[in-house]
Image (cartoon, helix red, strand yellow):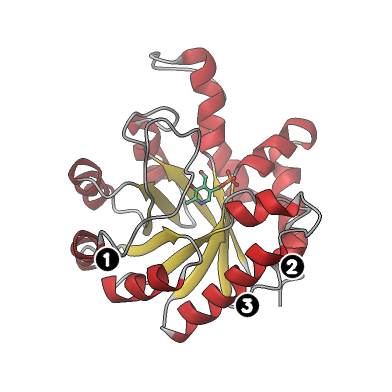
Amino acid sequence: MLKLGINIDHVATLREARYRGRTCGEPSPVTAAQVCEAAGAHGITAHLREDRRHILDRDIWALRQVVKTRLNLEMANTPEIVALALKLKPEIVCIVPERRQEVTTEGGLDVVAAEKSLAETCKKMNDAGIEVSLFIAPDEAQIDASARTGSQFIELHTGRFAEHFQGPEKGEVELQRLIAGAKQAHALGLQVNAGHGLNCENLTTLFRVPHLVELNIGHSLISRAVFSGLENAVKEMLAVMDDYR
Ligand code: PXP
């Protein structure tokens, strides 16, 4: 069964738009996580960015208290956040690149360039009982390097596929890259997640990618929740995902 991890950063983004610098405010990403879990989500994902633009430290510690499925901490590979993750003990961390100017995580990690320090972080996490996923583009060299770091998962960046899906070729070229990447990673013993830009429309095409374990979806789900409610939006996504074979 394909699992759904829900990225709740967008709930915190909405709160911060009004309540930045305050110790209270709505909507609460922690309550959102509870609603998502009650609706059937298999995990909760939150990105504690260096600039704390959406998820705050207090959110991540509260999430650790309430999340009953699986907490996936998205994080940059920096000493501050590595130390925090080792204390927080999420079930899994997803290491992502972080650029201050970007609106959201724009590209994949350059594992080839940072292989040594990523391998060190993977070892620290694994020794603490935390699994590791690396967020990468479907690129042969990046997948080979990921397998060498000791991470258990990769998360294939589906952003380019989602972008091209709106064009006449419906993302076919990017889809072929994702298919090849998933096969390569699976053959190397990596588990394969995917995420970024996924929605109920492009998901069924993405299902041609084999070996997928979990999808991480945020923006389209929270957007849909504005009109149909979070519980319904999660259930609707899960119903679409039921067709993955
Ligand atoms: N996976 C990763 C690693 C991400 O950085 C994001 C975006 O925060 C997502 C998944 C979810 O992307 P979206 O919000 O476009 O569904």
Q: Earlier in the sequence, mark 1 or mark 2?
A: 1
Tag 3: amino acid: Pro
Q: Is residue 70 above or below residue 11?
A: below
Q: Residue at 33% of width from left, 72% of height from top?
A: 145
Tag 1: amino acid: Gly
- Judging depth in this view, the residue of 237 and 41 nearest the camera is 237
Please give left or right for residue 116 compared with residue 232 in the image: left
* Residue holding disc 3: 210
Between the residue at mark 3 and the residue at mark 1, the CA separation in whole angstroms equals: 28 Å
Q: Percent position (x, y) of residue 171?
A: 71, 59
> Mark 3 packing: few (<14 Cα in 10 Å), some, or many (20+)?
some
Q: Nearer the viewer, mark 3 or mark 1?
A: 3
Q: Quadrant of residue 124?
A: bottom left
* Residue holding disc 1: 129
- Judging depth in this view, the residue of 231 and 224 nearest the camera is 224
- Judging depth in this view, the residue of 78 and 129 nearest the camera is 78
Q: Percent position (x, y) of residue 195?
A: 56, 56
